[in-house]
Image (cartoon, rainbow, N blue to C red):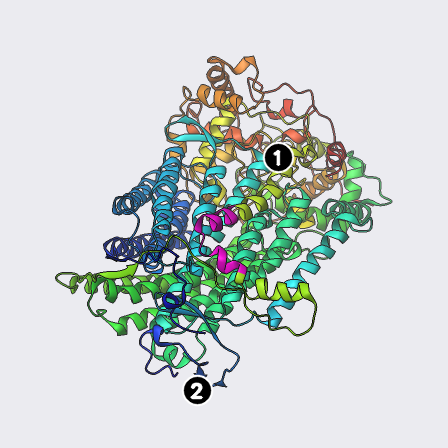
């Protein structure tokens, strides 16, 4: 048959259809099914379809065998822990970080650690203090005025315990001791920088801090 | 070998072949078609509005009822259950009657189904914008509406459909009917078991499941809503309307058997791929991934059968917009069902999850497959149902092209935006810190894509308006009196003898192979099932139930799936009230509460989430998209003062934020009196609330905590008079999120007052809470 004069599918019966573009399709043969004029060919499922289907089943078996029953595969949590351990080693190996004045000043002189701390600050502190420390809801950290800081170790104490009835939250459980020393040094070093938008000063003016030293 | 079917069928021995006369009920199909067009316009308009809101937050006009979190569920419910729902009902009511050579079983049930379903849609529109929601995606509607859905779907629609099968005059069921059967039984199962909840009030209920188990049930439902509401009925639609419009035989009967059963059995397993890297146990995640990968070919079976049916008809496709709609629809189906398995691969999902990539994926499926298949069907049906010419063929053709351009302009920028954001989230610089430490940077970067998406959505919406115009004008020109032809067909004979098993085409003498070839490969065995609707339905139920139980039973019974964490305690009464506001405002539409064990993610949000942290979360609120940052460890990260200011206007604190304003929370009173009932229902669900929050004490506890928080707020320099406002409860909830894991195990359960920032951290120093992982044990 040809497609031109087949208004009703029910006339589609008999020999295999001739596709004018692709030539004869002698393999097609109609089944005897007919529903409201709809007919069905009895074509086999394509070979590539079988191959990929069987291949996907085989892949699945191998995947389970490897990831769930072999001793060499790592769980997602184990892979995460390995990265975590490598990070701690990379940042802090061979270094003793102490939350006293000497310790914070020493860390403040460690340029790679300060770059790292900048990221931690921007992810966690910028919501209140702004990315450059100029202050939004939290205080301006760039000027010479300090509300809860009297001496350098207070940076660590305020970050650890919070201040002002929780207006400054405690970050004790969010960061390790070492990370809080880094943050204390970073915040200390924000003093004297020029933010895009500075919140008015709050608290007392402190004398200049000593220079960071190794 | 190709005589008309009726003539070749053996007749029962008693020779009962009396001719019967009947008429098809096309009035019900007309109703469903018009409802499809109407709800298509409404649902897509809401989609357009929320797309604009993402780029321009002020577009919600600052009203609580039009905020993104409340309108997004309205959009998804409207396009899935109203637009696609009515389209699939139109398809089923039109084709089932003709495939069964029978009028629908009951006109009363047909009309109850139609009007009941429209009433459900209207009730969704009247509840979701008011924050009445169960807080589970695509299952948001509250319990009275859930009950109505069950009654209308199974009691009216299901009975009517299976009744029609029972009185059919066609011996065998065509493949479209198989897909309809699978749709009806599976959607019933999914809806009932995912929606199980204990009512608190007429407009509030709590899921009986919590945390990991609730997440599992939700995505078992959510994924299979895609499968059995948006895929199987539309494959049925394709199998009827495509060969009708193309006037060509279906490419392969045997392929339709294989892909039907493999699709129905395998789809059910795939739900957990929505929960990769979450606190869901790894084995479930793996099953979800692998069954999705294996589902690729079963899905493509439908595409092959659709596209190859058009062999020899491509000259017609070139001139017929209806066939073009089908070709594009099936092509989008093919792309979406390749992309689905790809996205389900864990490492791909690590990038794509929580981004717009998923949104692009579902829209290429929804706009391309569901939309275009529906449009093709409607344009084919309009002249037949209203017995007049289509008003404008030119407008139909314009709809096709504007719709296609609309889809491309929608999905391409959103694919780009999704991948961009996913890469930005995980990017590190040389110093080992996040390259984009501030979340909002990754939002601002997407704004150009968001605007292009608005243009694409607008074009698609204009196309739907063209369909609406064409429909209205065609209806206005309808026949004065509909010609309802009287059909005559013989009733089914009481007995039927199956034709003999066909000769095998294999050569050789291996008996088993020859028998298998003739009985199975030829499809002979299946031909027998096709004339037994009850057996067929039971087999379909067995397939989906078996597949479900393989995952559900271990999820609920293996205790190691959710290791207990002693320090995780129930929410305080005030926090519970705040959680309800979180759900009502639809916060989960933009914020996840699930930190994955991915390095960039713990760097940004903190310790990854553990299964044991969610055991009191009825329902879970893990979310599926991060339009805003994750909140799983939000507790204690900002002051109460910051939160209240942020709710009043997020842009006061973050100029680039696209979060809606929630000023109404600062003005509306908190319903303290209703808290007791909520605590009691939670206790009924097994949340260990002690005596100190029973018989009215919960209300008192909430007031005490609210009072103290309000006082702290003032001391922090914040707003006065917040102690009896909704915002105080919501802030209390947010301040609790993710905190318990770092508490000592012997902290008092459900403290009457919230621990202040100072008291909270008596736990002592902890190094990155690594000890928590150890405490939790192997997962």
Furthest residue in direction front, as rendered? B14
Label 2, on which residue?
A20
- Residue found at x 46% / y 23%: B678
Q: State the image coordinates of residue B560 (x, y, percent, origin top left).
A: 70, 34
Q: Is residue A95 above or below residue B765?
A: below
The residue range painted magenta reads B525-541
- Neighbor class of circle 2 (other Cα within 10 Å; few <14, some 14-19, many 20+) is few
Chain under callout 2: A
Task: Indicate left or right for B305 with B35 as reference.
Answer: right
Q: Is residue B317 magenta?
A: no
Q: Quadrant of the C terminus of chain B?
A: top right
Is most of the magenta stretch helix, strand or loop? helix
Residue B556's disc number: 1
Which disc, if any, is residue B402? none
Q: Nearer the viewer, residue A207 or B53?
A: B53
User: Would you say residue B529 sits in the magenta stretch?
Assistant: yes
How far apart are labels 2 and 1 at the CA level?
59 Å
Mark 2 lies on a secondary structure that is: loop
Q: Position of residue B183 (x, y in %)?
A: 44, 50
Badge 1: residue crowd in 10 Å (few <14, some 14–19, many ≥20): some
Tag 1 subunit: B
């Amino acid at each position: 048959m040809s497609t031109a004069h087949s208004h009703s599918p029910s006339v589609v019966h008999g020999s295999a259809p001739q596709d004018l573009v692709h030539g004869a399709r002698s393999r097609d043969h109609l089944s005897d099914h007919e529903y409201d004029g709809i007919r069905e060919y009895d074509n086999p499922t394509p070979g590539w379809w079988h191959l990929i289907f069987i291949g996907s089943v085989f892949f699945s078996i191998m995947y389970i065998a490897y990831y769930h029953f072999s001793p060499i595969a790592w769980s997602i949590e184990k892979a995460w822990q390995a990265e975590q351990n490598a990070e701690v080693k990379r940042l802090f190996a061979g270094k003793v970080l102490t939350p006293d004045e000497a310790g914070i000043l020493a860390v403040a002189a460690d340029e790679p650690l300060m770059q790292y701390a900048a990221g931690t600050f921007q992810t966690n502190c910028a919501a209140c203090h702004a990315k450059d420390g100029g202050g939004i809801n939290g205080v301006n950290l760039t000027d010479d005025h300090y509300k809860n800081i009297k001496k350098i170790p207070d940076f660590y104490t305020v970050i650890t315990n919070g201040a002002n009835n929780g207006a400054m939250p405690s970050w004790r459980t969010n960061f390790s001791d070492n990370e809080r020393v880094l943050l204390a040094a970073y915040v200390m070093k924000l003093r004297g920088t020029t933010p895009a938008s500075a919140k008015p000063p709050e608290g007392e003016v402190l004398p200049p801090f000593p220079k960071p030293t190794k | 070998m190709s005589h008309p079917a009726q003539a070749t069928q053996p007749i029962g021995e008693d020779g009962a072949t009396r001719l019967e006369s009947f008429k098809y009920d096309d009035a019900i199909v007309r109703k469903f078609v018009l409802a499809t067009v109407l709800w298509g316009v409404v649902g897509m308009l809401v989609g357009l509005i929320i797309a604009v809101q993402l780029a321009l937050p002020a577009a919600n006009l600052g009203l609580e009822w039009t905020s993104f979190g409340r309108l997004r569920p309205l959009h998804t419910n409207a396009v899935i259950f109203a637009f696609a729902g009515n389209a699939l009902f139109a398809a089923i009511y039109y084709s089932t009657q003709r495939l069964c050579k029978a009028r629908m079983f009951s006109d009363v049930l047909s009309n109850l189904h139609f009007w009941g379903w429209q009433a459900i849609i209207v009730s969704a529109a009247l509840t979701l914008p008011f924050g009445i929601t169960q807080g589970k995606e695509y299952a948001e509607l509250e319990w009275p509406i859930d009950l109505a859905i069950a009654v209308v779907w199974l009691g009216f629609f299901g009975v009517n459909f299976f009744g029609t099968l029972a009185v059919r005059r066609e011996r065998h069921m065509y493949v479209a009917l198989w897909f309809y059967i699978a749709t009806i039984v599976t959607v019933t199962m999914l809806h009932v078991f995912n929606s199980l909840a204990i009512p608190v009030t007429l407009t509030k209920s709590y899921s009986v499941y919590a945390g990991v188990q609730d997440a599992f049930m939700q995505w078992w439902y959510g994924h299979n809503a895609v499968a059995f509401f948006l895929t199987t009925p539309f494959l049925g639609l394709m199998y009827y309307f495509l060969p009708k419009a193309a006037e060509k035989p279906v490419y392969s009967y045997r392929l339709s058997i294989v892909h039907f059963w493999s699709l129905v059995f395998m789809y059910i397993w795939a739900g957990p791929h929505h929960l990769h890297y979450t606190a869901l146990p790894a084995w479930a995640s793996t099953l979800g991934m692998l069954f999705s990968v294996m589902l690729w070919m079963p899905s493509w079976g439908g595409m092959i059968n659709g596209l190859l049916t058009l062999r020899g008809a491509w000259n017609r496709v070139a001139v017929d917009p209806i066939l073009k709609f089908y070709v594009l629809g099936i092509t989008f189906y093919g792309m979406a069902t390749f992309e689905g398995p790809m996205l389900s691969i864990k490492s791909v999902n690590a990038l794509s999850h929580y981004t717009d990539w998923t949104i692009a994926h579902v829209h290429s499926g929804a706009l391309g497959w569901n939309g275009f298949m529906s449009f093709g069907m409607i344009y084919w049906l309009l002249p037949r149902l209203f017995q007049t010419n289509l008003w404008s063929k030119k407008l139909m053709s314009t709809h096709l092209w504007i719709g296609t351009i609309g889809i491309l302009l929608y999905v391409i920028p959103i694919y780009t935006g999704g991948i961009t954001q996913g890469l930005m989230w995980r990017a590190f610089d040389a110093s080992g810190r996040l390259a984009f430490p501030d979340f909002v940077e990754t939002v601002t970067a997407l704004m150009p894509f968001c605007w292009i998406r608005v243009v694409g959505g607008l074009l698609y919406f204009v196309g739907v308006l063209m369909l609406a115009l064409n429909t209205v004008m065609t209806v206005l020109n309808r026949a004065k009196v509909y010609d309802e032809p009287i059909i005559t067909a013989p009733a089914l004979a009481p007995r039927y003898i199956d034709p003999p098993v066909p000769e095998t085409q294999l050569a050789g003498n291996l008996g088993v192979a020859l028998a298998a070839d003739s009985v199975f490969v030829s499809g002979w065995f299946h031909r027998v099932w096709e004339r037994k609707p009850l057996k067929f339905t039971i087999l379909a139920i067995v397939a989906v139930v078996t597949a479900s139980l393989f995952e559900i039973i271990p999820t609920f019974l293996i205790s190691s799936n959710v290791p207990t964490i002693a320090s995780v305690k129930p929410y305080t009464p005030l926090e519970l009230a705040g959680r309800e506001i979180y759900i009502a405002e639809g916060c989960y539409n933009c914020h996840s509460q699930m930190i994955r064990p991915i390095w960039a993610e713990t760097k940004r949000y903190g310790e990854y989430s553990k299964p044991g942290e969610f055991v009191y979360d009825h329902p879970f609120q893990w979310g599926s998209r991060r339009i805003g940052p994750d909140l799983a460890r939000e507790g204690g990260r900002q002051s109460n003062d910051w939160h209240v200011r942020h709710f009043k206007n997020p842009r006061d604190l973050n100029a680039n934020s696209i979060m809606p304003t929630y000023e109404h929370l600062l003005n509306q009173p908190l319903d303290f009196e209703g808290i007791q009932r909520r605590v009691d229902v939670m206790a009924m669900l097994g949340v260990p609330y002690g005596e100190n929050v029973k018989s009215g004490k919960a209300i008192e506890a909430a007031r005490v905590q609210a009072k103290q928080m309000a006082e702290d707020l003032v001391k922090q320099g914040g707003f006065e008079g917040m102690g009896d406002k909704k915002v105080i409860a919501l802030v209390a909830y947010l301040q609790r999120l993710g905190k318990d894991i770092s508490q000592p195990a012997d902290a008092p359960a459900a403290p009457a007052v919230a621990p202040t920032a100072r008291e909270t951290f008596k736990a002592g120093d902890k190094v990155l809470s690594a000890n928590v992982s150890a405490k939790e044990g192997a997962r």
